[in-house]
Structure formats: structure tokens, C-alpha cells
Amino acid sequence: MTLKEHVRTDIRPVPRQRKTPRDRLARLDVKASPYLYIAPFFVVFAVVGLFPLLYTGYVSLFRWELGSDNPKFVGLHNYAELFADDQFYKALTNTFSIFLLSSGPQIVIAVLLAALLNARLRMPTAWRVGVLLPYAASLVAIGIIFANLFGPNYGLVNSVFEALGLDRVDWQANRFASHIAIAIMVNWRWTGYNTLIILAAMKAIPKELYEAARVDGASGVRQFFSLTLPLLRPTLIFVIITSTIGGLQIFTEPKLFDALPGSNNGGSTNQFQTVTLYMYQTAFESQHFGYASAIAWVLFLVILLIASVNFLLTRRIASTGGPS
Amino acid sequence: MLRSLLTCASVLALTAAAGCASSSTPSDTPSSTANGPVELTIATFGKFGYEDLLKQYEQAHPNVKITARVTGQGGPFHQEFLTKLAAGSGLADVQALEEGHLSDFLDKADKFNDLAEIGPKDADASRWLPWKFEAGKSKGGKLIGYGTDVGPLAMCYRKDMFAAAGLPSEPDKVKDLFATWDSYFAAGDTFVQKGGGKAWFDSASQIFNSMVNQLDTGYINKSDDSLAIESNPKIKQAWDKVTGAVTRNQSAKLTAFSNEWNSGFKQGAFATKICPSWMIGVIKEQAGPDNAGKWAVTDAFPEGGGNWGGSYLTVPKQSKHPKEAAELAAWLTAPEQQLAAFKAAGPFPSQVKAIEAPELLATTDAYFGGAKTGEIFANQAKKVTKAQYKGPKDGQIQENVTSPALAAVEQGKSPADGWQQAVDGAKKLVR
């Protein structure tokens, strides 16, 4: 059989029927080529986006340890266990707490800073670059330095507190204090970045509106609240959405904040362990891959939920927004 | 290319002979006959002191070419090790494996070569300290690693602080204080009363881990890999002793290896430190030249001896040249080579002959008042009587369950609540 095939490849091709194949090719070109052109994106997405997503869902139905040859199918057991897992709720609470403590003040400060930078300044570019500098610093370096500053025994912050006659704070042990310390770390890095986005939006507000307001006798403060802020709304929504996504996935800061180098515990009683940190620990330290996949899926759904709330809000504000 | 493949396929079909495969893949059989050059890789972390030794080995074996992969930290190294072991490819022919991570790997012994089978005959049990050799065996008796170094435990302490508190301070005189854990904590009470606000030890988990390591059974039972944290009353007894000392202000409450812990050495925040051989270097670095001569080390440890740290060289099944890899691992872990590594980078040898070598015994340390560190740690290594069985997740229970629970007690949680946290955490991890 193989011999026959082999022989056939050596036979000279039959005289070509000129028109039909070319026509067919042309028709194929029109029909298939567009799909080929857009294929790279979809292939890449399917390989690195969709497949991992679905496979994570598949893994979450098993009790699956790294390197074990026969994972055990457990159905939705991992999810049932997860919804009764105190540590998961604790991590979720920590995540939201750190997110609120960071995103809230961050956006307020960013708007105020942008307003300052929008005023007439000497060397405006130098100031603008200045606020962006923390963003350029290495996240790991920031983490290590801040963990040092907030050291309970020999940290600079506590030394300053003591010099001012205040009580020392155990930034590691106290749950709320640890969230504040981590939020400060996040804010330090991201405020400048958001400031510049808001500043760009401020620059886009037509000057005529301010002139009209001035003619009407509006003070600077009044201008800011009645003119600048309403016109910034779409940009603010964007900034809020991006910081929500970032805030819910916060990982490096709490990991580096832990006194024990490399630890994923988020403190001695998981007081500052975030959901992503818990997921990472479950997968790569405890090697409960099934359970970690369940965490990943639930986190995905939580983010989806919050994103859709954001989306609804944005649509609503976009339709009613604008200067009245 | 395609054409040759087709030709090949047809030839194969015609003659049904396996003549085609041989040209594309050199050989699947282990090249023990070694007609061509053998390429070996060896993966280690931190400082093993193998750089010069590997060159020597290449010179002595012209057909062997060695590539060394060195990772800085042990944590990421072992995580990668575990992942590649599970993936079935990507590991080096010789992989280093640290004692603290051993439990996770002994569990997967079927993915390693049995060195007792494929290794050279002279690399047998008599080469190593018995407990070191035994700990490298899986439950089924398979030898997955040749021991490299050990971390025998001694006691380091601050001479000046002992003297100030009215305790004996010379290395020969303090041994009674370090005879048992009870005498250790009793001396701690005396010290705290007169120590002027200084702590007796650095961190509760450091003491607790040493105590649990001395027990016959660790966190996991050997018989059925069940959790022993509740069934072994000695673990709870150790917990009570340590947390009792914490409530009596003996702990400096510093998380080991944190920045604060490092500062604690400089500030003289605590008077004693459990001291595996490699801790000598840590103390020197962290306490700094300002504290030279204040630290001392003595060859005593509560309830005998103990070990913390040290590694093995393993040959995973993935290796294409298991026999050559085992030969290299055996050569590197021979007494002469481990002595050379000790001189180059400091890992304390685990081989009987190396430990008895005069050059090792003559090692002294000026920072510790000229103490004979070589002799002290050699003595301590011999005091270790047995290898405790480390079941799956044993290392993680220590790292992620009991240590944080003890830190929580140091941060104000009651010892009873802390114990509950430890038990719950261990159950969750093992399930």
C-alpha cells in the first residue's frame, strides 16, 4: 500500500485544467482570507486566554495535586468547600478593605493634584514628571522599602510617632493598620499616574466655559465644583474602573509587606492576605490546584460582577452627564 | 526534507527495518559506554562551593561536559523543581534538594532514580552520618539523594549580656543552662528578670521548630501519613513550653529572617540564638563588626542535638544520563570534595571522614572569640541520633501553619487560640 503511494508521488502531474482550480482558488481567497487575516488574534486569544480560562474551570472540578498522576473528580465540591472557607472570606474582606483604602483617597488626591498642576506654574513639565516618578520605580523596591518603614520595632514611621509623643502601632499585627500601610504603598505608586490622566482631561475642558463662569462671578472653588468636576466625570469613571481592576488583583504589595521574606501568608493570622495571594499560596505552595482553580473562578466572577456594575453606572452617567 | 522523509517512510515500509530513526535521534539508551561526549547539567541554589570542583571533574573526565545552573534563593528554586518534576521535563541531570523541602519530594520518589541502584558502589551508607543518609530515603527505602552538607545545631549567645544578668558567660560554663529545654527556659526567666528589658530568644518559632524536630514523630505519622499534630502529645507540650516562655517575655517577637530580625542582631535585642553551623555567617553579617567578640558559641544544645538545613544531590528520572549523573553526584559528595566545598563556601560536610578531618577540626572563628567552630559543629553533628520521618506537607506545616500561629501568640493572641489556629491550619493543609 505504502509502496503504491510512494510510486504515485513520483508520477508527473496530469496536464492541468487551467481555469477551474484558479477560479476555485479565487473564490476561496475571497471567502477564507478575511478569516485568515483576523485569525492570529483569535488563535493567540484561544491559546493564552480562552483555553486557560476553560481549563481552569475543568481543573476546579478535581482534587488535583501538582505531579499527581490520577486526579480525583469531585464535581462542585471545591466550590462548596470554598463558600464555607473562613480564610477565603477573610481574604475577600481584606482585598476590599485595601482596595477602598487605596482607591478612594487616591482619586481624591489625584484630582486635587491635577487641579494644582493645571494652575500656572513655573516649569510645568518638571512637576508633571515629578508626580509620575513613583510610577517608574520598581514595585519590589517600593515594597521592600515600605515594609522597612512600617517595621513594628525598628521602623522609621514608629520612631517618628514616638518622637511626636504618639503610640507605636504594630503595622504587622493590627489588621486595619496593616491595610493602611499597604494602601499607602499602593497610593504612593499610583496617585501620580492617575493625576496625569485627570490632568489631560482637565486640559481638554474648553477655556470659554471658564471665561463665561468668571463673567457670571463664579469663584475659583465654585468653578472647580460646578464646572471642572462634572466635565471630568467620564475620565473619573475610567480611572475608577482601572483602579478597581488593579485593586481587586492586588498581590505584590501584601506579599512583600509580610515580615517573613517570600511568605504568602499575609501576616500571622492572614490579616492582610488578599484573594490573589491566597490563590497563589493554595496553588503553588499547598499544591491544591483544584481548589486554587475554584478560587480563581470565583474571583473572576466577582470581578465580572463589579465590572458590570461599573459598566451600568458608566452608561447611566454618560447619558445624563455633561454640563447642565 | 519532506522528500527524504517520504523516501525514508517508503524504505521503512519496504524493508520494515528501523534504519531511519537512528540518524535523527542520537540514542535513547543511556550512554554508559560513553563513546560520544556526555553533557551533564547540575542545578544548585545559593552557595554550594562547586565552581572549582566541577572544573576538576571535567578535567578528569574529558568526555564529560558540565553546565551549572545556579539559582540565588532556595524558595523559587524548589518551586521550579517541583513544577518541572511534575511536567516531566526541564530538570537538570543532578538537582540539589534542601532538607526543608525534602518532605514534598520524598512523596514523589517514583520520579527519582534510586541511587543505591545506579550509583557507584563506594557511595554507600558508611560514607555519611547515619541520620543524614537515612533522611534521604523514601518511605519505600529508595535512596533519592546523596547528602551534601548538614546544619548541626549548637547554641550561640551574647557573652556580655549573660555576664550583665549574672549568668555564667564562658562557653564551658554555660552548658548546664543549655542541658534541657526546661533548664533553657528557666535560665530565660532569670535573664529576663535581670536583663534590663532584653529578650532571651529571637523568635518563638525558631525554638519550637527545633523542639519538634527532636521528637520521634513530626507533624506526620509514618505509618499512614496522617496528621500527628493532635495525636502526638509531645507537640502540644512543646507548644505549651514555648508559648509559656513568650507570655513570660522571653521572646523578642521578631520574625526570623525579616528586616526587623536583622536589626535585632545589631541592636542586641536577644541573648541566645539556636545556631545551626550556617547561622555563624548570618550572625556575623547581621550583628556586624561593632558586635565582634560579644557573641559566643558552645557545643551544647537542649536535649542533645539537632539539625537544621543541609542538602542532597538527586538524579531525577528525567535525566538522559542517569549513570553519569549519579557518578558526578557521588564524586561531589565524597569527603574530599565536600571538604573543598566547605573551604570554598562554608557548607558543613555530612561525611564521617570529612567531619573527622584535622583541617576541619582546626577551623576557628575570630568573631566568636576564636571559638573552635569546626570542632564544635562536628561534635554537635554526632549528637544527632535519628532522622525524623518527614511526611508530605511537613515542611509547609512548619512554615505556613505553626510559625504564623506562634507569631500570632507573640502579637497578643492567647496560647490556646493560637494552638487552635495551628491545628485548624494543619488539618486544612493536609486534608
Image: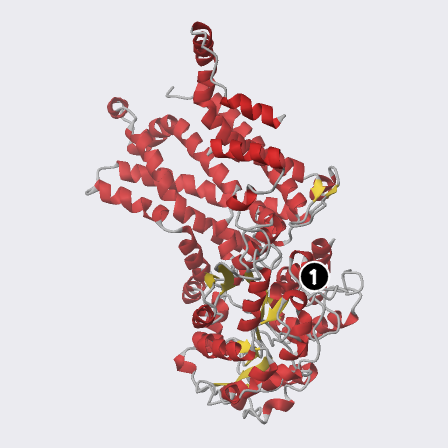
Image quadrant holding the C terminus of chain A, namely: top left
Question: Looking at the image, which is closer to me, A52 or B120?
Answer: B120
Q: Secondary structure at mark 1?
A: helix
B215 left or right of A246 in image: right
| Place of residue B198 in the rendered image (x, y in percent of width and height, measured from the top left) | 53, 79
Residue A291's place in the image compared with B409, above or below, is: above
Query: Given the image, on which type of amino acid does mark 1 rest?
Result: Ala
Q: Quadrant of residue B126?
A: bottom right
The residue at 72%/55% (across/down) is B430
Asked whether residue B189 appears in the rendered view, the answer is no
**Residue tagged by mark 1?**
B422
> Closer to the camera, B208 or B71?
B71
Relative placement, left or right, of A103 versus B423 is left
The quadrant of the rendering that contains the N terminus of chain A is top right
Q: Is residue B346 above or below residue B116?
A: below
Q: Residues within 10 Å of mark 1 (few under 14, many from 20)?
A: many
Q: For mark 1, name the chain.
A: B
Q: Is residue B173 visible?
A: yes
* Image spot of residue B395 (x, y percent): 64, 63
- Residue lying farthest to the front in this orientation: B15
Tell me residue B331's x, y (percent). Answer: 54, 72
Going by the picture, which residue comes out furthest to the top?
A19
Where is B216 relative to A75, above or below? below
Instruction: Name the residue nearer the viewer: A11 or A23.
Output: A11
Tell whether B268 sits left or right of B417.
left
